[in-house]
Amino acid sequence: MGLNEKPLSTLHEKSSYDLGDFDVPTGREEAWRFTPLTRLKGLHNGKAEAAGHVRLDVDAAPEVTVETVGRDDARVGKSFTPTDRVSAQAWNSFEKATVITVPREAVASKPTVLTLTGEGDGAAYGHLVVKVEPLAEAVVVLDHKGSAVYADNIEFVVGEGANLKVVSLQDWDDDAVHVSHHHAQLAKDATFRSFVVTLGGDLVRLSPSVAYTAPGGDADLSGVYFVDAGQHLEHRLLVDHSQPHCKSNVDYRGALQGDRAHAVWIGDVIIRVEAEGTDTYELNRNLILTDGARADSVPNLEILTGEVAGAGHASASGRLDDEHIFYLQARGIPHDEARRLVVRGFLGQLIEKIHVEELRERVMSAVEAELAR
Amino acid sequence: MSTLEIRDLHVAVEDKEILRGVNLTVNSGQTHAIMGPNGSGKSTLAYAIAGHPKYTVTGGRVLLDGVDLLELSVDERARAGLFLAMQYPVEVPGVSVSNFLRSAVTAVRGEAPKLREFAKDLKNGMDALSIDPAFAQRNLNEGFSGGEKKRHEILQMELLNPKIAVLDETDSGLDVDALRVVSEGINRFRATGDTGVLLITHYTRILRYVKPDFVHVFAGGRIVEAGGPELADKLEAEGYEQYTKASA
């Protein structure tokens, strides 16, 4: 490296719209080593023909416009470039994209809810753009249900001083496979709040990423997952601090129960040379409730500048603490209820942060139902 | 009228015998102090009675009003009327004090308390122990000081109103003011008349505030001497030395 060259990040260097630029993953690659490729039903190797269907129903706030557009629409694909094989496959395979626009300075009076219902049989590919123009504010809910083999890219384009809150629920049927990329691009002083809840599906691999185009951006990414026997739920986060004085906070928590319940969490944060004054923290915690469940948790913090305001990460996976349970039981609380109280407490602190009240209740009752199994 | 009977209790931890035949009967209306040096097995007695999984009972019985507690699970023992105030209450993240107390009271009473009544009981209980009302919304024991944790244990005892309360070194780590507040709580509980107290302590200091009816000296995993309150004065003057030598 010459004196005038900047140090480069080693994380996520490759990006392309061209499917041919990505080899079919073998499972040996760093990005794929945790994912059971045989259960992707061909989303990764080109064999998943787009014969299926995921129905989209939109209940939009009156201030928001909803359009269905073709691949050639100028707003599509502007904020991101695919960074892995399945993302590139989805980009090359979708036919119609949905564009949600929150006009300049508009404040959406209610959440815009997109319900995606998998109708089984065959793969489907999707593309969604949520464009929040300068100084506008909105809440968007993505509610995934049904049975599907689905790969999609979502672009959240948050304009100057705008505020976007997103809740994405993966509440699929047991046999669903979902590989999704959430790309958020934050302009100057933009605020982005993402809350991911993953409960259902045979295999869900969700990759939320954040990029900044100017200083002052603030991203908060939270997630809750509950992994049952045989499920593979994977979350791969990337926050790329390439602008000075931006913030990011990541907090993902999961509970696992049952044989071969597998959670994967990857938290990559890059603080590039230009990103002075960055303030970032990422956290992942897993609560393992039974034997046979496994959590892989890998935080990567790559700091290429010496001038950060704060940078930290933490990862902890542990079993339910016998001393906690003993304490509650010693006060007369039966074992199962003690366990529920502790798990509900563990996830509840985060669930409280969900931006939509009805969803908080729904997620809390879903967690209760999982615990009662 | 309730009775806790401990008969020839033997307890081991990881194959090491800690309790070697403990015999003790506590009736309601009585306060028994168990005093002994560190490592004598006092806390083991408390945790074994409560049913902590780390301790294995290798012999003997523990009866509460004729029911063998050793046959019951930890929560069943609590619902049968046993309470253990812990020496080191654990922090439980995400579970609020008020939610925890309501769950505990519901479990012990067998029905959910009326919300308004419970709120009043909780407020009165907290006031009496000089606990900041904001604690009700905090996570269980999380960030509590040593004294706050102990006061919170006594609050639970008063709300759950057990037949027999075992207090494991509740006085340790308390300053004089906190000790007085905690002792007043124990005395209020005793004054109800139909409860028995087993007070485990290393120091005689708390016995100036909470007068025992009986004092037992614990050494080498069993009771080695029993007497009235005057035995505490003797221990104050002479220490545990003679007992530790004898049991060694």
Image: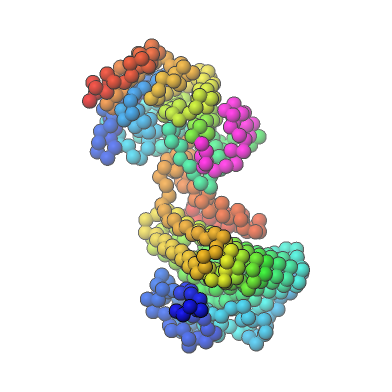
- Give the residue displayed 33% in from the left and 28% down from the top: B38
In the picture, measured across the screen, residue A359 lies left or right of residue B80, that is right
A243 or A233: nearer the viewer: A243
A54 or B217: nearer the viewer: B217
Residue B120 part of the magenta-drawn span: yes
- Residue A163, image x, y percentages: 69, 65
Residue B155 part of the magenta-drawn span: no
In the figure, residue B60 lies in which quadrant? top left
- Identify whether A322 is placed above or below A49: above
- Residue B141, image x, y percentages: 51, 39
In the image, farthest residue toward the front: A3
- Identify whether A120 is placed above or below B226: below
The chosen color scheme is: rainbow
In the figure, residue A185 lies in which quadrant? bottom right
Residue A19 makes an appearance in the image: yes
Q: Which residues are magenta?
A: B117-145
B143 or B62: nearer the viewer: B143
- Which quadrant does the N terminus of chain A fall into? bottom left
Residue A36 makes an appearance in the image: no
In the picture, measured across the screen, residue A136 lies left or right of residue A250, that is right
- Identify whether B227 is placed above or below A97: above
- Residue B202, image x, y percentages: 38, 25
- Give the residue displayed 62% in from the left and 38% down from the top: B134
* Count of numbered marks: 0
- Residue B151, image x, y percentages: 52, 30
In the figure, residue A69 lies in which quadrant? bottom right
- Give the residue displayed 46% in from the left and 17% down from the top: B208
B126 or B172: nearer the viewer: B172
